[in-house]
Amino acid sequence: MLLSVENLHKSFGEMNVLKGIDLSIEKGSVVAIIGPSGSGKTTMLRCFNALEMPDKGTIQFEQDFKLSFDKAPSKKEILQLRRKSGMVFQSYNLFPHKTAIENVMEGPVVVQKKEKAAVKKLAESLLKKVGLEEKMHLYPHQLSGGQQQRVGIARALAIEPELMLFDEPTSALDPEIVGEVLHVIRDLANEGWTMAIVTHELKFAEEVADHVIFIDGGHIVEQGPPAELLKNPQEPRTRQFLNRILNPS
Amino acid sequence: MYLNNLLAAADPIVDWDLFQSSLWPMIQGGIQYTIPLTLISFAIGLLIALLTALARLSNSKILAGIARVYVSAIRGTPLLVQLSIIFFGLASIGLVIDPFPSAVIAFSLNVGAYASEIIRASILSVPKGQWEAGQAIGMTHRQALARIILPQATRVSIPPLSNSFISLVKDTSLASTILVTELFRKSQEIAARTYEFMQLYITAAILYWIVCFTLSVIQGRIEKRLDRYVAK
């Protein structure tokens, strides 16, 4: 398993958002995480790279890295954990004072201290991969939402993470440009990237994910292959959620 | 004699000979003292301000507390009193500092306190997602601050910091009270000799105005340059 999570807990003040999450993600697989808003799915994803600090539990990458949160981890351990994943945000969070290619180069150059010329080549090829080789010298405000999100994906890929995390990557986009971002994610799946995607796009999850996790109330309620979970859910809460999404009126 | 001089001072017509002979000493006072005093104090003041802002934003209660007391003390007391304490006060207890360095210390501390609030607010104005995006690519706190947050905070802080800078140019005239022969003190000295108070002080005012006007033009240029990455 690339990622194994055990007994993950997180609360904000009095609110218990995650109440003991156990899950594992196989190397090369795509996991879609679905659930109603407020269910804890985004918090869970953000715990995977310690953007939210879990209160309890362990996060393990393969055999070589295991971090327990039962006592507060050191800054160094948190950095080690973070550097295993790349993250794509719902609101892109591009660096507005840097051009597209500078956004992509920032991680490898500043964090990984790689040689600039080599990183530039890498960044160019990544921006080409997401279809933005023409736009690489533009600033984020000169790009559409879909283009910004694709730069966000290239920026996350540039640090060559073991795991890609997507936090509702298309939720802030106009419906007609959701497709261009999903297209890029689909390509990454075909290339064998390991990915965890929090999403509301059930059709996309069905098509791209190897595994779907349904979260509600801070628990994993049900998980399984998309064909089973989405077509033939066992748990009443899963059925209720899918019903509401598929028949919104 | 006295009366004659006073009457001459009331004469509304500009004394061009005096204008010519007084202009250069005043400009000299500006070049020798007003401008260096402004530049040096502002540079040191900005450094103090940045450290103070970071101390106030830090997790350390002690650092934040020290910073808070410093800002409160400087903002709560008149600049003229601060200058007097540093020059006359310290001298009276045996610590004699020359007029110019005294002025630099007082103005730096003053800028440091006011500008720290500007810098703190600009750092807080950068969205939380920017910190997170830096952390997500593996940056340390310090890297994210230096590479991601401060450049964006700088853009926000330029207009208010320019205000402080322009205020400082004018405030340096207070250094005249501790014997720094800057622009205004020069005009006072000449006025004391010639009794042409109106003409000399108006000349001094115009010289300050020219400097401040030039600075606000430069401010506009800097803002425009830093705005290149912001949606219009």
Image (cartoon, rainbow, N blue to C red):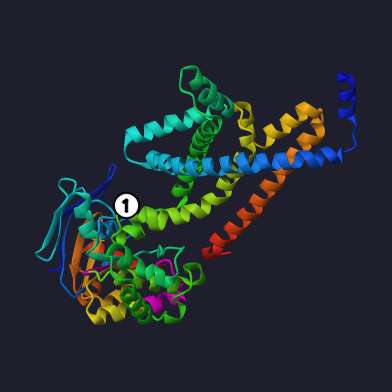
Amino acid at circle 1: His
Find out whether residue A54 is within the magenta segment.
no
Residue occupying image coordinates x 73% and y 39%: B205
Question: Disc 1 designates what residue?
Answer: B141
* Location of the C terminus of chain B (image quadrant): bottom right
Say if residue A149 shows up in the picture.
no
The one of B31 and B208 positioned closer to us in this rendering? B31
Asked if residue A76 lies left or right of residue B72, the reply is left
Magenta span:
A162-181
In this view of the protein, which residue sits in the foreground, A131 or A36?
A131
Pointer 1 chain: B
Residue A95 figure quarter? bottom left
Residue B65 in the image: above or below residue A233: above
Q: Quarter of the image holding residue B127?
A: bottom left
Task: From this view, report whether residue A240 is shown above or below residue B71.
Answer: below
Q: Is residue A149 left or right of residue B114?
A: left
Picture quarter with the N terminus of chain B: top right
Q: Is residue B35 left or right of residue A247?
A: right
* B219 vs A200, nearest the viewer: B219
Report the number of discs. Answer: 1
Q: Position of residue A220 (x, y in %)?
A: 20, 60
Q: Residues within 10 Å of mark 1 (few under 14, many from 20)?
A: few
Query: Is A178 colored magenta in this rendering?
Result: yes
Residue located at (37% from left, 81% from top): A128
The secondary structure type at the circle numbered 1 is helix
Residue A17 higher or lower than B205, as above or below: below
Q: Is residue B192 visible?
A: yes
Give the image location of residue B132, x and y in percent.
Answer: 34, 57
Please say if A2 is above or below B101.
Answer: below
Q: Where does the image place residue B214, in percent across and percent down from the top left? A: 67, 51
